[in-house]
Amino acid sequence: GPKVLQIPSHQIIDMGQMVTLNCDPVSNHLYFYWYKQILGQQMEFLVNFYNGKVMEKSKLFKDQFSVERPDGSYFTLKIQPTALEDSAVYFCASSPTDSGNTLYFGEGSRLIVV
Amino acid sequence: GDQVEQSPSALSLHEGTGSALRCNFTTTMRAVQWFQQNSRGSLINLFYLASGTKENGRLKSTFNSKESYSTLHIRDAQLEDSGTYFCAAADSNYQLIWGSGTKLIIKP
């Protein structure tokens, strides 16, 4: 089936440093999402993105977070600066439309902030 | 309160048996998606339903938007079915609201 690829799969970073998580969505999809999952807890919505813009974001999407997809390349989540509580698995997802289509998820990027 | 209530939170089954997971919704949902999160943490799409019932192998899922619930039935459970199962429902704005997950352990 359609694949969403995430790079890196794991990253350990010092608190205060910047990190960029990369997502290669399904090729004909138009809507992109980031979710955060702290170990053992449920998935939490961070942000969705369409046509070069953030459409919606949750309270978890702090000012230190930003997303972009320059010229159809990777859809990225940047955290600058990182904090200890940013340690989690970040899942990227994409869908062809926003209204009632299946989301396809990547395998997640495990971020550990030390 | 939570818009998506998933139960049970944990379930243990012997190989070859079956059971059902359930998500109740406190508001009208447009669609539901079920995922298995395996031991590596990967999310596997199981079902997407806007209504009715779908079946795939040993899994069957139903979504009843009028009565605000969805179920996931597993029959003839196998060891590889172990993992955490999540339902995620699309609200009126098509925003996904996640259940808290069911941790399923399959015993030999």
Image (cartoon, rainbow, N blue to C red):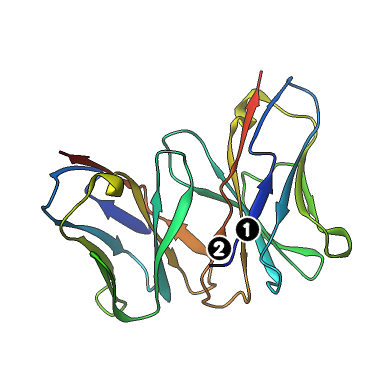
What's the CA distance linking mark 1 and mark 2? 7 Å
The amino acid on which the numbered mark 1 sits, given as a three-letter code, is Val
Percent from the top left, x then y, of residue A5? 65, 53
- Left or right, B49 with respect to A23, comes to left
Provide residue A89's location: percent of width, then percent of height: 57, 38
Quadrant location, the C terminus of chain B: top left
- Residue A4, image quadrant: bottom right
Residue drawn at x 46%, y 70% as measured from the top left: B91
B82 relative to B20, above or below? above
Q: Which residue is mark 2?
A: A104
The reply to whether residue A3 is visible in this rendering is yes
Q: Is residue B29 above or below residue B87?
A: below
Q: Are marks 1 and 2 in contact (CB under 8 Å)?
A: yes
Disc marking residue A4 = 1
Q: Secondary structure at mark 2?
A: strand
Name the chain under label 2: A
Answer with mark 1 or mark 2, whichever residue precedes in sequence. 1
Q: Relative to A3, say whether A106 is above or below.
A: above
Q: What's the amino acid at mark 2?
A: Tyr
Q: Residue at x 83, y 65 (%)?
A: A72
Q: Residue at x 62, y 77 (%)?
A: A97
Which residue of the protein is positioned furthest toward the right in this rendering? A71
Q: In the displayed structure, does residue A97 sit left or right of residue A16?
A: left
Q: Position of residue A46 (x, y in %)?
A: 62, 50
- What is the chain letter for disc 1? A
Depth order, front residue of B33/A81: B33
